[in-house]
Amino acid sequence: MNFESPKWGRGALDVTVVDEDAQRRRRRNVIIALAVVAIVVLLLAMMMLRGGSSKKAGPAAKAGTSQQDLPSVSVVVPGRQQVVRTISATGSIAARHDLPVGVTGEGGQVVRVLVDRGQWVRAGQTLAVIERSVQSQQAQQLAAQIEVARADARLAQSNLERAQALVSRGFISKADLDQKRATRDAAAARVRVAQATLGETRARIGRLDIRAPASGLVLDRTVEVGQVVGPGSGALFRIADGGQMELRAKLAQQDLERLSVGVPATVIPVGSTRTYQGQIWQISPIIDPQNRQGEARIAVPYTLELRPGGFATAQITAGSVDAPLLPDSAVLNDDNGSYVYLVLPDNKIQRRNVKVGSVTDKGVAIAEGLAGNERVVLSAGAFVNPGDKVRPKLAVTPR
């Protein structure tokens, strides 16, 4: 029998047990390592996915935020249309032909005034009468002298006829006959002189009456009964020839170049809503060197609202032009002139200098600087600057 076999058996068993424990530990370590690796891989994958999504969402979020922050402006595309070119002017009302009436004769004391301001008179009508008693006595004296001269002429004619009857008988010489004929002719001449003198006196008496040189409206009267007047007294009456009135409109030099005689105009008295139609009948050939303005004279009918000395405005039609028409709020001004703000295709603001044409109730016509297809900032021009990016919003303006 072999007594050492049990001891060998126990040792073999211990070795076997030890090997199994080592294997279990190795398997556990491997599992832990694999778990750690899996966790690390998962974390890396999550980080990569999160980073990619943040890269994609970042620009979009940023773009969305910046788009909301852009200012919104209203824009209008004006196009082109026929714009009536209207020129505005101001001036005073006056008689078209203001006729001063004064003393045409030697004058004297006024005994009667027959008309007053605001009355209509006809050509040749007596306006005032001057005392004429002295002149009337002179006329009567001259009339008497004519009768004396005529009596002398009749006597001279009778003497001549008797002398002609006696000359054939030899009682009167031809020299005496010629003398009597000369006496007869001198007497006839004296009659004509007396008649001419009387006619002159009567003409002077007629000139004592102050008469209207033309039909029209009496604008002013500066004479009263009892007043002594003469050639140096100045105008006693002022008459508007035919009652025709005019507006003497003051215009800039460049505006006068656009006008011509016959152009229609609408006249509005200050403080009134009524309008009166007239037309230009004369354009000043000179420009005032002080204010660089000229005068357009617009003929208008006489009414109580269009009295001489009053003030009025005029809207003068000077043709039409094909141009863009913008609201007043779209056109800005500074030291460099008029300008507008445009929105370019990339939605950036650009300044565009323009030349303003006529200004009407519908808006401002742009003579130069716009084609009509641009997007023009309508009313936010004071809150944007060139180069700013905006969100344009198309507005509809009435035509």
Image: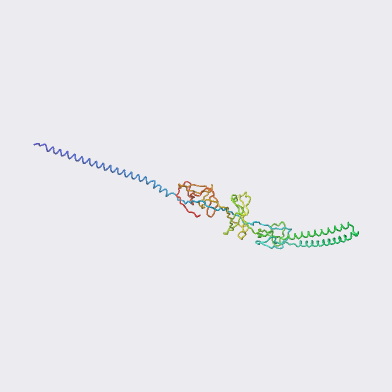
Name the side, left or right, on which 42 lies relative to 194.
left
- Where is residue 198 drawn, in percent x and y? 78, 60
Q: Relative to residue 281, is residue 112 depicted above or below? A: below
Name the side, left or right, on which 146 lies relative to 292.
right
Assign the N terminus to one quadrant of the image: top left
- Where is residue 148 drawn, in percent x and y? 82, 62
Number of numbered markers: 0
Residue extending furthest toward the right:
170
- Where is residue 169 drawn, in percent x and y? 91, 60
Where, by quadrant of the figure, is residue 210 drawn? bottom right
Name the side, left or right, on which 10 lies relative to 288.
left
Where, by quadrant of the figure, is residue 276 drawn? bottom right
For the rendered model, the colour scheme is rainbow
**26 or 98: nearer the viewer:** 98
- Where is residue 357 drawn, in percent x and y? 55, 50
Where, by quadrant of the figure, is residue 44 drawn? top left
**3 or 354: nearer the viewer:** 354
**227 or 303: nearer the viewer:** 303
Name the side, left or right, on which 276 lies relative to 143.
left
Residue extending furthest toward the front:
168
Q: Relative to residue 55, is residue 1 depicted above or below? A: above
